[in-house]
Amino acid sequence: MKHVYQILMLIAGATFLLGWAIKHSEPSSNVGLRYIRQAEQIDSGFWRDGFSRGIDHPLHPLLLVAAHHLVGGEGPGSWQRAGLVLCFTCGVLLVIPIYLLTLELFGSPTASLACLVAIANPIVGYIVINVLSESTFLLWWTFGLWAAVRFLREGRFLWLPLAILFGALAYLTRPEGMLLPVALAATLLILPLLRATRINWLGWWRALAFLIGGLVFLVGPYIALKGGLGTKPPIARVLGLAAQAGPLALERETPLPSGQTTIETYRLATIRVCQVFRDAATRALFGFALLGMVMAARHPARARARLFLAIVMAASAVALLRLHATGGYCTPRHALVPGMLLSLAAAHAIAEIVRTVSIPGRWLGLAHERLRPGPAVWVVLLALLIVLPRIRDLGPLNSGPYSVYHTTGEWLARNTHGAEQVLDLTDWSLYFSRRKGYAFADLYEAPADPNTRWIVVRQGQLGGHQPYSQAIRELIGQREPVAQLPPSPAPNQVQIAIYDRQARATQTTAAAIPLQAETLRR
């Protein structure tokens, strides 16, 4: 009953933290709109297009459809609200598997702290506010991770079907969900080779056979329908089934220099992956995470679980290395899985330090005329470690998390006429306007259409260092925006600028765009 009470209190805390993040953040990614459009296709009856032909795996869009029916309403705004409700709910419920997983790995003293540290991570708020599939993926994945750890620790066959089920749900949400059953299978193969992790041979064969058979039964039909593990280009590149992204591809963080060697590519990728691991756990907690991993390694009772988690971490690092080497990008959002494990390790280190140096029963730490940090001091320090990373990401209180895109959509609906086309680099503004036009993915092709008049761009996109930011600046030239929404943004508030290509410019280099597109095709 004690654990139930703590989980309920943590759910209330997670509700407050994520609610605060939603009210003080604005979406800065257009990826979530892709899932909403796929959900709209499914809801309209185009099951084949939305389920089997879509680039993304179908479970998140299917849950969006269910959330939309629950929330109700019509039009783009109703789908955006349904996405927020779904992702917010998954973010809050994530407390449950995190608590259970930490309980298995580090014990009761760390479980509550680990939930707070993990949920307060800015990446969690980011995926919720941008209605990304990682919100549902992380829920299934963490439940599966807990069941797998429980199975490896206890050896009870009951937990293996749960691990397979949640692993399948994670895979049907995002292709990297396959990492869970694959890592579990690799762990089972290695167990007989290590004295400290061996299990009886009968249980070993049964577990391995059941794992393979369960995967084939649950996800085999979908893999056969899709013709592979996934159709997303990044996955194909990571697996070596597709060529690397072009030198000026939209997703690249920096252009690929001509003549760059493979060794240099992987050297840069290694540096970037190390940075991403650090940022995924937040810089303030990364040192504690490393300390927590060292502390956990001293306990031999969980050797099988540690082997399994080490395989998960190593496989994640290799996948991220390949992602950057072949696609030219890698962000903390892509390191959610190792980032969460590092957060749990950081919570373990902090809990152990507090237990070691604090004075029981004295919150301020005064005893026998000596000053030692008591629990209250550590609570304040921990609050600073949790809050400080979020200050940079939180903007002012907003009237609605998508209000700036709704306002821009209304502007476009009023001011675009006839055959005029919009190149909307936010994607959301055009969606709310209910007008047809070009999206971010069409940046290099849209300028060739003489009807493309309006360009809608976030200021962050315009001033970035990515290849697409340079392309946007060349397309706009020296034109001044015809509208800026909001006109006077507060610090950390999203501002959208609208440009008119028919307006006179002192310098226009739109002709460079077809050349860049030609470079990409080569």
Image (spheres, rainbow, N blue to C red):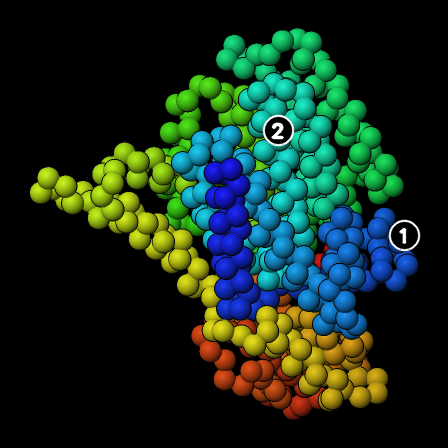
Tag of residue 148? 2
What residue lies at 79% left-to-right and 24% top-to-bottom? 213
Q: Residues within 10 Å of mark 2 (few under 14, many from 20)?
A: many
Q: Is residue 285 left or right of residue 128?
A: left
What residue lies at 69% left-to-right and 37% top-to-bottom? 166
* Up/down of 409 relative to 212, above or below: below
Q: Residue furthest front?
A: 1
Task: Name which residue type carries label 1.
Answer: Arg
User: In this orientation, does residue 229 appear?
Assistant: yes
Residue at mark 1: 48
Q: How far across and how far down the image is residue 356, in percent?
A: 27, 34
Q: Residue furthest bottom?
A: 504
Task: Name which residue type carries label 2.
Answer: Ala
Q: How far across and how far down the image is residue 311, in percent?
A: 57, 28
Q: Give the spatial CA distance, label 2 vs label 1.
A: 33 Å
What residue lies at 65% left-to-right and 26% top-to-bottom? 159
